[in-house]
Image (cartoon, rainbow, N blue to C red):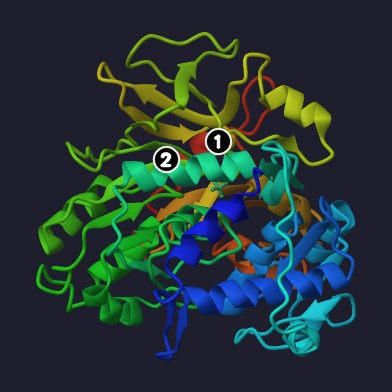
């Protein structure tokens, strides 16, 4: 039996009286409550036709019910496909068409296409179905093979359209076990969980550590610096993106006394600056533990729990995993040289959903996955990320792929062509900036935003538009985005 839920369920049943979820309004779900709710949603999913291997697409706000729904999907052998709540109707339509789910759980605005609805409290037509469940009846946990799919996480592609990374039960299990060991999870740990659960970070990395050990999570609907500040004295672990830390640094109550209970602060999903790392240590006495991961592989490397955590580095490969910094042929470059980061291990995904060519391009015959990130390795084996090969912009922890946005901007009347880049921003890490070549009069950012409002999530829309006569290009005709990034790197610090 390789169903990852089976492993989680054994932990739950060992600690049914323990707290699973402590919610912002003071309500608490015990592991017994969570376990029973998973049973109920499992019954509902099976009754409404979710067969093993079928996809369950979910685009809802974070709630305890949402987490139970994810676990129920694993239990019945379904494939969980979470979608960012910021995606617009047309983006969601693309995912539904691609994933072809048996069941789509959406917000009430999508009741036209959703099989069931779920609101921010977890209420809606799915919740109503629980009343029809047979009390005391338990649903079988479906047997799975290690490589059977447990989830598809959509990650935007450089072609502008998203690729679905297929993660297996073995991928989830191996990474959850590794992280729990590496980060020394304790029976009295309390995780402060303020991340979204439509993304690898909140859904797998954070939740799995707590669930695997049946320890409590303070489960907040979203990140609100003041609210998180208030809960810090009650937590032992915080996992966040760099924006969490920069925003918390602005809170006057951030003192060593307020975080006296914290065992470890963990950070990832985007680069943590040396400045934030140092400012955090000055304010709290804690060195943030930075780690490196992605939708396709969950976590690859981590700074050590015990031992030196070095600013600007993402540490060492997790036990049982490997990485190499390589040239285009996959041959390791010399220590200290920049190359593409490739990773191998039981965490590496099964390929891209219905994109065998893309999978073959990115997973080598020897099992190494070409991450597309550029890095260097030092003599001790520490990895540092120096950039992204794929021009990915990460704004507030979310990936933004320029090509997708450029495609829409170029269609706006008055735009001849455009280049979208990420520019350093104190709050978001990077902010989206559009460099526009107008056909006539200048095109302002409000015009661009109004054209994109119905097609692109807000976090993908440019915050500033710069008008230029021509885009810089190399001899091959490729736009030199590095030149643009250098030119505009101070755009937000000048404001
Ligand atoms: P996602 O699939 O949304 O998790 O995005 C994965 C990408 O985030 C990686 O390929 C990296 O480019 C970036 N990333 C994740 N963790 C870090 C980190 N600690 N430092 C720099 N970039 C990171």
- Which-is-in-front pick, marks 2 and 1? 2
Residue that lies at the very extreme toward the front in this rendered image: 136
Depth check, front residue: 96 or 105? 105
Instruction: Specify whether residue 115 is in view.
Output: yes
Instruction: Specify whether residue 412 is in view.
Output: no
Q: Determine the residue positioned at 55% across, 75% down.
A: 34
Decide: is 384 above or below 31: above
**Ligand 1 lies under 8 Å from the Cβ of mark 1:** no
Depth check, front residue: 174 or 114? 174
- The residue pinned by badge 1 equals 347
Depth check, front residue: 176 or 112? 176
- For marks 2 and 1, give the CA distance: 10 Å
Q: Determine the residue positioned at 76% across, 75% down.
A: 106
For mark 1, does the 10 Å Cα neighbourhood hold few (<14), some (14 to 19), or many (20 or more) residues? many
Which quadrant would the C terminus be assigned to in this image? bottom left
Residue 447: image quadrant is bottom right
User: Are the residues flagged by discs 2 and 1 in contact, CB closer than 8 Å?
Assistant: yes
Depth check, front residue: 393 or 59? 59
Relative to 435, 219 lies left or right: left
Q: Position of residue 171 (x, y in %)?
A: 59, 40
The mark tally for this picture is 2
Which quadrant would the N terminus be assigned to in this image? top right
Residue 103: image quadrant is bottom right
Relative to 340, 148 lies left or right: right
Q: Earlier in the sequence, mark 2 or mark 1?
A: 2
Q: Position of residue 486 (x, y in %)?
A: 43, 40
Q: Can you tell which mark lies on residue 479?
A: none
- The residue pinned by badge 2 equals 178
Q: Position of residue 438 (x, y in %)?
A: 71, 54
């Amino acid at each position: 039996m390789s169903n990852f839920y089976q492993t989680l369920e054994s932990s739950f049943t060992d600690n049914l009286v323990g707290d699973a979820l402590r919610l912002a309004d003071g309500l608490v779900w015990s592991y017994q409550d969570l376990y029973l709710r998973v049973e109920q949603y499992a019954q509902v999913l099976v009754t409404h036709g979710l067969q093993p291997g079928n996809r369950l697409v979910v685009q809802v706000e974070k709630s305890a019910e949402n987490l139970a729904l994810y676990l129920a999907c694993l239990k019945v052998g379904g494939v969980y496909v979470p979608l960012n709540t910021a995606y617009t109707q047309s983006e969601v339509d693309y995912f539904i068409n691609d994933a072809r789910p048996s069941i789509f759980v959406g917000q009430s605005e999508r009741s036209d296409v959703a099989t069931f609805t779920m609101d921010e409290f977890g209420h809606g037509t799915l919740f109503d179905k629980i009343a029809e469940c047979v009390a005391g009846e338990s649903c079988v946990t479906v047997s799975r093979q290690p490589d059977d799919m447990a989830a598809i996480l959509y990650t935007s592609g450089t072609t502008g359209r998203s690729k679905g990374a297929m993660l297996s039960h073995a991928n989830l299990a191996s990474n959850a076990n590794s992280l729990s060991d590496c980060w020394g999870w304790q029976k009295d740990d309390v995780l402060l969980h303020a991340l979204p659960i439509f993304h690898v970070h909140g859904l797998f990395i954070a939740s799995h550590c707590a669930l695997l050990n049946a320890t409590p999570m303070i489960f907040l609907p979203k990140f609100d610096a003041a609210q998180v500040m208030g809960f810090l004295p009650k937590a032992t672990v915080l996992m966040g993106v760099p924006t969490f830390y920069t925003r918390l640094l602005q809170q006057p109550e951030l003192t060593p006394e307020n975080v006296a209970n914290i065992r470890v602060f963990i950070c990832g999903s985007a680069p943590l600056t040396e400045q934030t790392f140092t400012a955090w240590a000055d304010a709290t006495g804690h060195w943030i533990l930075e780690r490196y991961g992605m939708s396709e592989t969950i976590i690859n490397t981590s700074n050590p729990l015990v031992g030196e955590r070095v600013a600007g580095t993402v540490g060492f490969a997790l036990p049982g995993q490997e990485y190499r910094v390589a040239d285009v042929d996959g041959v390791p470059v010399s220590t200290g040289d920049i190359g593409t980061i490739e990773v191998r291990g039981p965490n590496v995904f099964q390929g891209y959903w219905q994109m065998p060519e893309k999978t073959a391009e990115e997973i080598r015959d020897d099992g190494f996955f070409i991450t597309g990130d550029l890095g260097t390795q030092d003599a001790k084996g520490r990895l540092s990320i120096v950039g992204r090969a794929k021009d990915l912009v990460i704004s507030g922890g979310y990936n933004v792929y320029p090509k997708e946005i450029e495609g829409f901007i170029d269609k706006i009347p008055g735009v001849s062509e455009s280049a979208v880049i990420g520019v350093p921003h104190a709050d978001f890490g990077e902010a989206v900036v559009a460099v526009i070549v107008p056909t006539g009069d200048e095109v302002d950012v409000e015009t661009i935003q109004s054209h994109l409002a119905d097609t692109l999530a807000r976090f993908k829309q440019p915050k500033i538009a710069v008008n230029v006569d021509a885009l810089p290009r190399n001899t091959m005709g490729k736009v030199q985005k590095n030149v643009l990034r250098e030119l505009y790197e101070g755009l937000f610090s000048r404001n």
